[in-house]
Image (cartoon, rainbow, N blue to C red):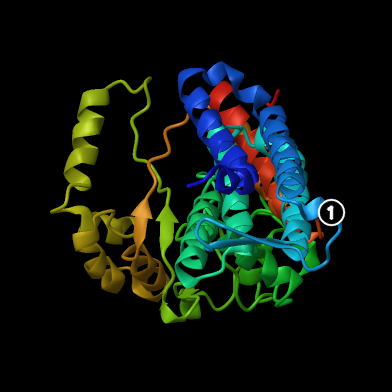
Amino acid sequence: MTRTDLVSLLPELILCGGGVLILLLDAVAPGLRRAWTAVALAVTAAAGWGAGAAWTSLGGAAGDPSFVWKSCNGMLETTRVTFAFSAVVLVATGICVLASDNYLRRERILGGEYYALLLWCATGMLLMLRATELLTIFLSLELLSISLYSLAAYHRRVSVAVEAAIKYYVGLYTTAKVSQSKYIGETELGNAGATSGGPNEDFGLGKLDLYIDGPWAKATLPTNSVDTSNIASFPIPSENGPNPAPVLSGGSDLAVFKTSPNPQAAWDLISVMDNPTNSTSFAALSGFFSPYSAQISASESTGGAFMAGFAKAALNGQTAPLNAKNWPTADNGKLNIIPTMLKQLMQGAPFASTVASANTQLQSVLNTGSTS
């Protein structure tokens, strides 16, 4: 490789080297993370200077419209067109660096990896612009695409499945129009803290044909509900067919109060009633279904038509053992973080910023017990 080859590669070498430097410094000096935006912007500006210097050094600034410079044994080509598009790529990279800073800080994911990947994306685009043969185009595309794939999954806390689920739930009102506006922001019992006036009461009185709830719903129906013998349940279908959609179950607890006069005896009774052997008969008596997957199929038949759908859905679920002492703070009548988020989305709030704000607030409350 000649000196002029290195000169022609100056912007790519600056971008690639800058990404490597940021990644290394991020590993050995994480305290510098707040400076990565400025560093990445400086690297991008340096690459722009490098592109201009290479253009001048190779003779492109002379004004010849037919100027063509081939380097690296003809694998790369520099022309007025490639120079112009390279400038566009570098400007776009700088804009991305600036635009993403606030988001990265808000989501608490500011790190050197993001900027390194972004700079390597730009490197791949610059090389692909000037490639003249298939192998160089392929390698440039691979550098670009691998970096882009990594960036797409950079925010590890964001789940595409969770996003789809939230949009589906909100879409029941905003798109499908199967939910009434009066229920926005309510629980099944009504407004926060209420014990009546919600969709379960309207369902029990025959004013609603269908609503989404859990297996405890039957116990919360009003005493004057109509046609209760014909109430049944079915699992929510999956996106691509009639099979049940996957569910994440929180579950209910059987517990012994600390003030119980005979806590050991009470715990022994629970252990006997709800062990795998007795769980099916206990579930039938309590109007629920067994918590054990191997016994749920039996509960599907013993729990009646109402429990059958919930039992079937439970077979396609996972249990989430949420053990957060601050959960009541996040879920009480004062905050109601998740219901408030859903209410805002149903009223037309932008999805990304609304969910990100709720996520940040929820993390703060669960970790510290405070919203500040």
Near-viewer residue (97 or 295): 97
* Quadrant location, the C terminus: top right
Coordinates of residue 337 in the picture (x, y in percent): 67, 41
Res. 188 visible in picture: no
Identify the residue shown where x is 61% and y is 38%: 14
Residue hosting label 1: 62
State the image quarter where residue 241 is shown. Answer: bottom left
Viewer-side residue, 133 vs 88: 133
Q: In the picture, residue 182 is in which quadrant? A: bottom right
Q: Quadrant of residue 349?
A: bottom right
Depth order, front residue of 364/103: 103
Is 15 drawn above or below residue 182 in the view shown? above
Measuring 43% from the left and 61% from the top, which residue is drawn there?
247
Label 1 sits on a secondary structure element that is helix
Q: Position of residue 48 (x, y in %)?
A: 74, 42
Q: Residue at x 60, y 46 (%)?
A: 4
Residue 66 position (above or below residue 341): below
Q: In the rendered view, would you say 286 is above or below 42? A: below
Residue found at x 27% / y 24%: 263
Image coordinates for residue 138, horizontal then vertical, percent:
47, 66
- Residue count near mark 1 (Cα–Cα under 10 Å), binned few <14, some 14–19, many ≥20: few
* Up-down relation of residue 295 to residue 113 (above or below): below
Q: Where in the figure is residue 112, as x and y percent of width and height? A: 56, 32
